[in-house]
Amino acid sequence: TSAMPPSFMMKPSLLLPFRKGNRRWLVLVAQAYVFHLLLSFIWAALFYAVDGKQWEEAEDGSIGASAFDEALWMMFCVAHQLTFGEFTPGTEAGRAIVCLAAFEAYWFQVMAMALVLVSQLAGERRVTILGVCQRFLKLAWPSFVAFYTIVILLAVVIAAVDFDNSGDPDRDPDMPHGFGTGVYFSWCVAHKVSFGEVLTVTPGGRTLVGILN
């Protein structure tokens, strides 16, 4: 007997298994994305307020008279977890803002997928962004706590292994160092946003980064 073709070839709708007539998920994701872009603009404005002057005064900093467009571009890239490394934060405050933006970008993608999945469940009432967020936090908070406990513990170890070398006389003065740098690096790796200006150089640090990633 001849082999039967795959089910999706006999019924192409299986490739897009959305409930018939239900396109609310598309509206919800579009609304969430607009809010996501608005937050990216806010992150860019905050980042420019703390790091903009430094970029404008640096020889290899901003291209034009203002560094706001570069800050906006960097945060747009962070929002989509696609960083190139041509622009990087230069202050502790700038790094803190990048960490917040990376956190928001990471969980936006998770929530966008949750909106699509929940909207297709049989018997679901009118799905809202706020309602899905509340359900997600209520059901997934143990995993959330476990995830960030692991991230913070690994960040502490990576910082101690690779970045706590301020007292080393052989340290390269051009290389970022310090405990805060290690935590910033680890946080960016965990949220899939890394600029490449900070790197691990020891086998132990690289092994931990592999686990974290």
Image (cartoon, rainbow, N blue to C red):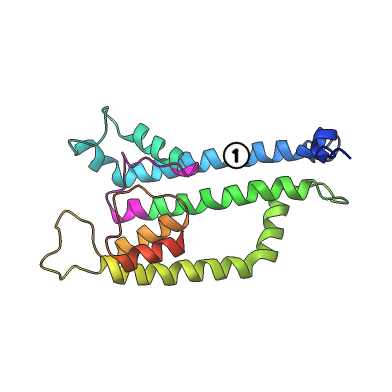
Magenta stretch: includes residue 154: no
Q: What element carries label 1?
A: helix
The picture places residue 135, in percent across and down from the top left corner, at: 72, 59
Sort mark 1 into few (<14), some (14-19) or many (20+) by Cα contacts within 10 Å.
some
List x then y, in percent, for residue 193.
43, 49
Answer left or right for 76 relative to 163: right
Magenta portion: prevailing SS class:
loop
> Residue shown at 39%/50% (left/top)?
194
- The relative height of residue 149 versus residue 58 in the rendered view (above or below) is below
Q: In this view, does 90 lie above or below 26?
A: below
Front one among 157 and 53: 157
The picture places residue 146, in percent across and down from the top left corner, at 56, 70
Instruction: Work out whether residue 158 can be spotted.
Output: yes
**Visible residue check, residue 11:** no
Report the residue at 76% width, 50% height from top: 118
Q: Which residue is drawn at 33% across and 65% down?
A: 205
Q: Range of the magenta residues?
A: 78-95
The quarter of the displayed image where residue 58 is located = top left
| Amino acid carrying mark 1 in the image | Tyr
Of 100 and 19, the residue lying toward us: 19
> Which residue is the site of mark 1?
33
Residue at the limit of the structure toward the left, as seen here: 169
Of 40 and 187, the residue lying toward us: 187
Image quadrant holding the N terminus, namely top right
Query: Residue 90 placed where, x, y %?
Result: 27, 49
- Look at 29% across and 45% down and name the residue there: 51
Q: Residue at the front extreme?
A: 1
Q: Judge from the rendering whether residue 198 lies leftward or rightward of residue 102; answer left or right.
A: left
Q: Give residue 145's quadrant in the image.
A: bottom right
